Image (spheres, rainbow, N blue to C red):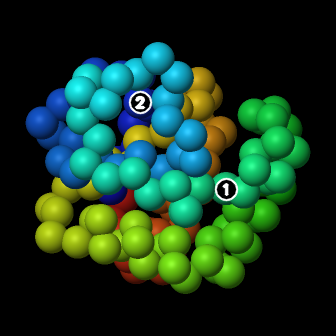
Amino acid sequence: MAIKRAYEEPADADGARILVDRMWPRGKSKATARIGAWVKDVAPSKELRTWFAHIPERFPEFAERYRAELDANPDGVRELVDAMAGNERVTLVYAAKDPDHNNAVVLRDWLVDRGLARRA
């Protein structure tokens, strides 16, 4: 499983591209984004996103809180797992500017830790 910023050029090697943000990436058209599924319900809550504010120093606590939200969200996780099903390659797509401190990083690691995906 890979992760990729929504503003990077889509590639055939991405496989199934799944948007895992609550909001659509600003200024990106659906045609150019090549998103196969948009799983909003697996994204961090508005309250958690607002608290995090993409401040790197808050990332460890953000990751912990987001993992707790995922643990408590079987319906959202099921929707994501269903979107991933049957795809040999999956790329989680996110809009944040920071490639190291964002929800897709935490989500990928959470899925790998639970045996629901393999790291690319």
Residue 6's disc number:
2
Q: Residue at x 49, y 35 (%)?
A: 24
Q: x and y percent of residue 105 in the render? A: 54, 49
Q: Is residue 84 left or right of residue 88?
A: right
Q: x and y percent of residue 14 in the render? A: 22, 41
Q: Residue at x 58, y 47 (%)?
A: 22
Marker count (numbered): 2
The residue type indicated by label 1 comes to Pro
Q: Is residue 82 above or below residue 42?
A: below
Q: Residue at x 41, y 46 (%)?
A: 19
Q: Residue at x 24, y 27 (%)?
A: 31
Local crowd size for mark 2, using a 10 Å CA cut-off: few (<14), some (14–19), many (≥20): many
The residue type indicated by label 2 comes to Ala
Q: Give the quadrant of the N terminus.
A: bottom left
Residue 78's disc number:
none
Q: Secondary structure at mark 1?
A: loop
Q: Is residue 21 above or below residue 71?
A: above
Indicate the quadrant where residue 29 lies.
top left
Residue 44's disc number:
1
